[in-house]
């Protein structure tokens, strides 16, 4: 019987990139039998509004087959993930009995690419001498920083570059340098362990 891991994201680039990351993690966990649903896209400012996250969860479950768990992945931006995560998780748990996880990329999803930058050298314009910055998760403007690490005439385009970078990035580098990626990996593993056929 099939079972699906669904996700809710805030960016168009993540709609294509997050399934890539999830499939790679499921392969590492020997859980390739789990299906990955197309992410549900919601604007970041909508998530914090009462009822909007709950509506997104219910629509995700209704529109995707055999959902067994839901992962919400958002950018922390200038917010404190330690404050927002429990609030959103509580709202998730009031909307569904399914296992759920809330992960905030600190500060942006692209910080994970900065953390694994050496593994992206020579790809989609990343210079061959590009190196990860110190503390990539504390950089405001990770997208702009990626563009600065590209060859002249090339700039970072989230919808085009995110899926390719997600396929190539070395997880061990991102885990070593980005605590929020560590949490992402850990939470996916937890969700997988708790998933049961619908």
Image (cartoon, rainbow, N blue to C red):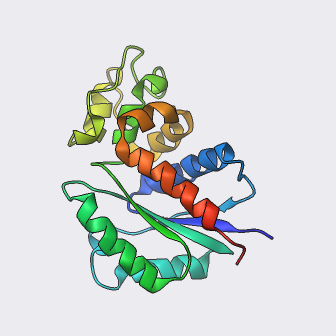
Residue 86 in sight: yes
Q: Residue furthest top?
A: 129
Residue 71 position within the rendered picture, expressed as x and y whole percent measured from the top left: 49, 64
Which residue is rendered at x = 50% and y = 49% of the image?
Answer: 185
Left or right of 163 on screen, residue 147: left
Residue 183 position within the rendered picture, expressed as x and y whole percent measured from the top left: 43, 51
Residue 96 position within the rendered picture, expressed as x and y whole percent measured from the top left: 51, 83
Residue 26 position within the rendered picture, expressed as x and y whole percent measured from the top left: 64, 50
Which residue is rendered at x = 69% and y = 75% of the image?
Answer: 66
Q: How many marks?
A: 0
Which residue is rendered at x = 48% and y = 78% of the image?
Answer: 57
Left or right of 124 on screen, residue 5: right
Q: Work out which quarter of the rendered image holds the N terminus and state it.
A: bottom right
Which residue is rendered at x = 37% and y = 80% of the image?
Answer: 91
Q: Is residue 191 above or below residue 94?
A: above
Q: Is residue 98 above or below residue 28?
A: below
Choose top left, top right, bottom left or bottom right for residue 174. top left
Q: Nearer the viewer, residue 16 or 191?
A: 191
Residue 53 in sight: no
Left or right of 49 on screen, residue 100: right
Q: Nearer the viewer, residue 53 or 90?
A: 90
Q: Is residue 44 above or below residue 111?
A: below
Q: Residue furthest right?
A: 1
Q: Work out which quarter of the rendered image holds the C terminus and state it.
A: bottom right
Q: Is residue 38 above or below residue 154?
A: below
Left or right of 48 on screen, residue 14: right
Choose top left, top right, bottom left or bottom right for residue 143. top left
């Amino acid at each position: 019987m099939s079972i699906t891991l669904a996700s809710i994201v805030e960016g168009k680039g993540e709609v294509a990139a997050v399934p890539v990351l999830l499939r790679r993690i499921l392969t590492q966990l020997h859980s390739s039998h789990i299906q990955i649903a197309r992410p549900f896209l919601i604007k970041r400012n909508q998530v914090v509004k009462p009822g909007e996250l709950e509506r997104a969860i219910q629509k995700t479950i209704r529109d995707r087959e055999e959902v067994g768990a839901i992962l919400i992945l958002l950018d922390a931006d200038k917010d404190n993930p330690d404050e927002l995560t429990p609030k959103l998780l509580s709202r998730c748990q009031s909307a569904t009995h399914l296992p759920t996880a809330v992960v905030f990329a600190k500060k942006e999803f692209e910080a994970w690419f900065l953390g694994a930058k050496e593994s992206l050298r020579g790809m989609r314009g990343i210079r061959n001498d590009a190196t990860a910055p110190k503390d990539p998760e504390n950089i405001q403007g990770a997208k702009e920083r990626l563009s600065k690490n590209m060859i002249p005439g090339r700039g970072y385009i989230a919808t085009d570059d995110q899926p390719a970078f997600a396929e190539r990035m070395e997880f061990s580098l991102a885990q070593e340098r980005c605590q929020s990626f560590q949490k992402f990996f850990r939470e996916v593993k937890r969700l997988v362990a708790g998933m049961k056929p619908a």
